[in-house]
Image: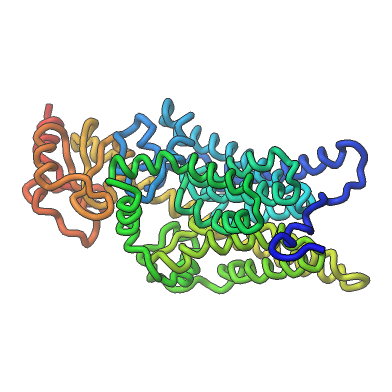
Amino acid sequence: MVYGVDALFTGVRRREPRTLAGTTWQARDDALLAAVAGAFTLAQLLLVGPGLGLGWDETVYVSQVGAQAPASSFSAPRARGVSLLAAPVASWSTSTALLRIYLALLSGLVLYLALRQWRGLFPASVLAGAGALFATLWVTLFYGPQVMPNLWVALGALICVGCFLRGSADRSDRAAPWGVVAGAALMAWMRPTDAVWVAAPLLVLAAVTRRPRLLAALVAGLAAGAAEWVVEAYVRYGGLAERLSEGSRVQGGLGWHVAVGDQMRSLVGRTLCRPCTAPMPHPVVTLWWFALPLLAVLGLVVAVRAGRTARTLVPLACAVTAAFPYLFLIGYAAPRFLLPAYALLALPVADAALHLVRGPHGRWRPVAVVLVACALAGHLGVQYAVLHRTVERSTADRVAWARTATGLHRLGVRPPCLLTGDQAIPVAYYAGCASAATRGPDTSTTEAGIRATAERIPVAHLTGPGHPTPAYAYAWDDHRIGKVSVQVAPTARQDASR
C-alpha cells in the first residue's frame, strides 16, 4: 500500500492500455495530434493573416534583431527569448508576412510536440480535444503568429509538466528529464518570472517526493533559460533585485491588486487593458471563462474516480500558480497573460467534456452529445467573433502607424532620425527611426539630449489628442498627420528643402 504524497503517482505507473498491434496506435495518435496542430497553423494564416502589421510590443522585440529600425528601449520586465525566436527571419528580412508565416508554422509544430509529451498520461482523444480547445481560443489564435512571449510560455509549460509527470510515473524514462529541461528553459527564455510561477508546484512536488533527477532537471532548465536575463540584470541594472524592482515599477507597482474584473473586461478583445475602465462585456462573451474552472474541477473529479489523480491535479496546480500573479498581483490586464493557465486547464477540461459525452448510457447519451456539441458550437462562434473584431481593430492601429510614418517621411523625417512622444515606439519602427522618451517606463534620454540630437539628425515629436506639447518642441514647426499633431525640429526642415 502506498501512503503520502507519493501516492499521487500510483495512478500513472502504467500507460493507457492499447488494443492495436505493433505501432499502429502510435501512428494513429500522432496523426490525430498532427491534424490538430496543422489546423491551428492553418487557422492562424486564414483568420489572423500574414498581412497583419507588427504591434507595439512586437516592434520592440523585432527591433532588437532586425534591420528596419534601431533597437527600441528594452524595459526591465522583458526577456530577449522571443527576439531570438524571431531572429532566423527578422535578422535578414523586413517582411512581416514572412515572419508571420514562420511563427504560425513554428507554433503549430511546437503545439504538436507539446501534446505528444502527454501520450500515455491521457488518451489521444483527450489530448486532441485539449489541443483543439486551446488552439481555438481567440487569444491563442491571435498571438500564434505574433512576436510575443506568452504563447511560448504556455507551450513550454505543457512540455515541462507533461514530461515531469512521465518522469514521476516511470523512473526509467530517460527522455522525460530532458523534456523537463527543454520545457522549463523555453518558459524561462521567454519570461523568467512566469516560468518560476508555473514551475513552483513542480519544484515543491519534486522535493517532497524525493525525485532528485526531476528537481535537477527543473532547476537546470530554469537556470539555462533565464541565464541571459540574469546576466543582463547585473550588467544593466546593478543586480537581480534591482531589475525585479525596476520591472515592478514599469508595471505600475506589483502588489495586491485584484485584476479578475480587468481580465474579464479584456475578454472582448482588448489586447491591453490599462487602465481598465471599460464596461463589462456581454455575458455571452465571458461565459466560457467561468465555465473553464468548473469543467476543470469536473475533470479532476473524473480523474480521482478513475484512479489517475496526479496527471490532472498537477497541471491544475500549475495553472493556478501561473494565473495567480496576473489575477491578484498586477494592476492591469491583457488576455495573453493567462495563456499558460489556459493551456494547462485544457487537459482536464477536455477530459471532462469527453466524460459528459461518454458517461451517460441509454437514451441520455444522445442528449448529452447534442448539448455538448451545441455548447462547443456556441463557444467557437463567440471566439471567432471576438477574434474578427480584434484583428480589425489591430489592423486599423497598424495602418494608422504606417500612415503617420509615411507622412513623417514627406516632412523630411527620414532615417537616421528620432521620434519622441505619443506612440513614438511603433511609429518609429515603421518610419525606420529611433525612439526616445524623457519620462515613463521607457525613459531613455533627457530634453537636453533631444535638443542636441536635433542638431544632427531629423527629430520629431508626436502629440496625441489631449496631450500637451513638451517645452523642447514649442518652437518646432507644427503639422497634422491624421489625428496626430507632429512637431518637426529645424534640422528636418532643412533636410526636406534640399
Q: How many marks?
A: 0
Q: Relative to residue 136, is residue 372 drawn left or right?
A: right
| Image location (x, y in percent) of residue 35 | 73, 43
Q: Quadrant of the N terminus?
A: bottom right
Q: Is residue 73 above or below residue 356?
A: above
- Residue 90: x and y, percent? 43, 31
Is there any visible trace of residue 266 in the rendered image? yes
Residue drawn at (70%, 47%) of the image: 167
Q: Give the side of residue 231 with respect to residue 464, left or right.
A: right
Of residues 260 and 119, which is closer to you in this image?
A: 119
Q: Say left or right for 455 vs 352.
A: left
474 above or below 231?
below
Q: Nearer the viewer, residue 481 or 116?
A: 116
Closer to the camera, 198 or 2? Answer: 2
Occupied quadrant, residue 2: bottom right
The residue sitting at 45% across, 35% down in the picture is 84
User: Looking at the image, which is closer to me, 302 or 60?
Assistant: 302
Q: Quadrant of residue 252?
A: bottom left
Q: Which percent across, then down, holds residue 154?
A: 56, 51
Q: Could you tell me which residue is drawn at 46 percent across and 63 percent down?
A: 325
Q: Is residue 387 visible?
A: no
What residue is rendered at 83% in x and 51% in y?
16
Q: Is residue 23 above or below residue 420?
A: above
Q: Is residue 477 left or right of residue 276?
A: left
Image coordinates for residue 6, horizontal then vertical, percent = 71, 60
Q: Residue furthest left?
A: 475
Q: What coloring was used for the rendering? A: rainbow
Q: Quadrant of the C terminus?
A: top left
